[in-house]
Image (tube, rainbow, N blue to C red):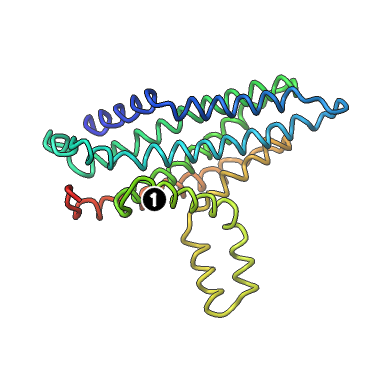
């Protein structure tokens, strides 16, 4: 456990030194502040549009941070030839993967905390109210969904040949899941036949990232957030899916030669 935590801390420090998060946060903050300063005929719904845009930006930035941070981890270790002394500590390949996973996931959690805190402050300045619980639940769902994205990128770093291809494919897959997965069951019903069966299969085996993505609507329209009977199974599902991706990554990684 000490080895896993030590590797995770190194990943966190690496993210702090890099400029990815700072650039994305500044861009998000500037766009959000500009939108927040707009006042069209004293329309009170402007705050809702502000949150919708800001939450979309937060999701895009969080995907970029999660995928970019995770995709380069194993490649950097191989290129710098640090993976050999690291595994000779001794640190097992499973511990290396878990350390990289938790480091990237915790880094995503820290970034989300900053993003959501900033959004809550800006939105509260326009709405003159703040539902802390709703923001906490939305961020918790978002962070849990990113565990699946981090696991996907970590698995991709073993399967694909370069960080660029891994990051591009993972980002396209994540965006496709967010926007298309909710419609796959309808498409399967309308299509029918073998193609409809395949579509249903894709619908059931892909992670439901859209559950966390749709939590934005509760914040935008001030609806009550789902209770623990809904939140609990969703968190367990994300944890199970991330665990499955990590297990698959470990099975492939333990058979992979380190010089390739």
In this view, the residue in front, 236 or 150, is: 150
In the image, residue 56 sits, relative to residue 253, either above or below, namely above
Q: On the picture, is 126 further left or further right than 145?
A: right
Question: 190 or 16, which is in the foreground?
Answer: 16
The residue furthest bottom is 193
Name the side, left or right, on which 243 lies relative to 220.
left
Q: Tell me residue 113's x, y (percent).
A: 51, 27
Viewer can see residue 229: no
Residue found at x 65% / y 73%? 190
Q: Position of residue 36 (x, y in %)?
A: 72, 25
Position of residue 79 measured from the top left corner of the image (x, y, whole percent): 23, 39
- The residue sitting at the right extreme is 41
Read off the residue under disc 1: 165
- Quick check: 99 above or below 230? above
Q: Count the marks: how many?
A: 1
**Left or right side of 103 for 234:** right
User: Residue 233: image x %, image y %?
Assistant: 51, 48
- Horizontal relation, residue 3 to residue 218: left or right: left
Which residue appears at 56% of the width and 39% of the height? 59
Q: Which residue corresponds to the image point at 48% horizontal and 58% vertical from the top-left?
A: 206
- Quadrant hosting residue 251: bottom left
For label 1, the SS is helix
- Whether residue 54 is visible to the viewer of this picture, yes or no, is yes
**Mark 1: few, some, or many residues within 10 Å (few <14, many ≥20)?**
some
Can you say which quadrant of the picture contains the N terminus?
Answer: top left
């Amino acid at each position: 456990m000490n080895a896993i935590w030590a590797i995770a801390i190194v990943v966190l420090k690496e993210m702090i030194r890099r400029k990815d998060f700072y650039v994305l946060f500044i861009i998000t903050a500037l766009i959000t502040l500009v939108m927040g300063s707009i006042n069209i005929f004293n329309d009170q719904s402007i705050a809702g549009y502000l949150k919708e845009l800001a939450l979309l930006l937060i999701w895009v930035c969080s995907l970029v941070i999660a995928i970019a941070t995770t995709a380069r981890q194993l490649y950097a270790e191989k290129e710098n030839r640090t993976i050999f002394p690291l595994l000779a500590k001794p640190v097992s390949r499973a511990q290396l993967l878990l350390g990289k996973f938790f480091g990237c996931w915790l880094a995503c959690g820290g970034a989300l905390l900053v993003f959501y805190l900033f959004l809550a402050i800006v939105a509260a300045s326009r709405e003159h109210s703040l539902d802390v619980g709703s923001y906490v639940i939305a961020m918790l769902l978002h962070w849990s969904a990113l565990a699946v994205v981090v696991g996907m990128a970590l698995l991709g770093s073993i399967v694909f040949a370069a960080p660029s291809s891994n990051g591009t494919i993972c980002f396209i897959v994540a965006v496709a899941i967010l926007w298309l997965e909710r419609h796959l069951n309808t498409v399967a019903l309308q299509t029918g036949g073998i193609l409809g069966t395949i579509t249903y299969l894709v619908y059931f085996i892909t992670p439901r990232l859209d559950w966390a993505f749709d939590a934005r609507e509760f914040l935008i329209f001030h609806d009550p957030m789902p209770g623990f009977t809904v939140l609990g199974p969703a968190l367990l599902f994300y944890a199970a899916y991330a665990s499955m991706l990590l297990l698959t990554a470990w099975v492939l990684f333990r058979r992979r030669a380190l010089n390739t």
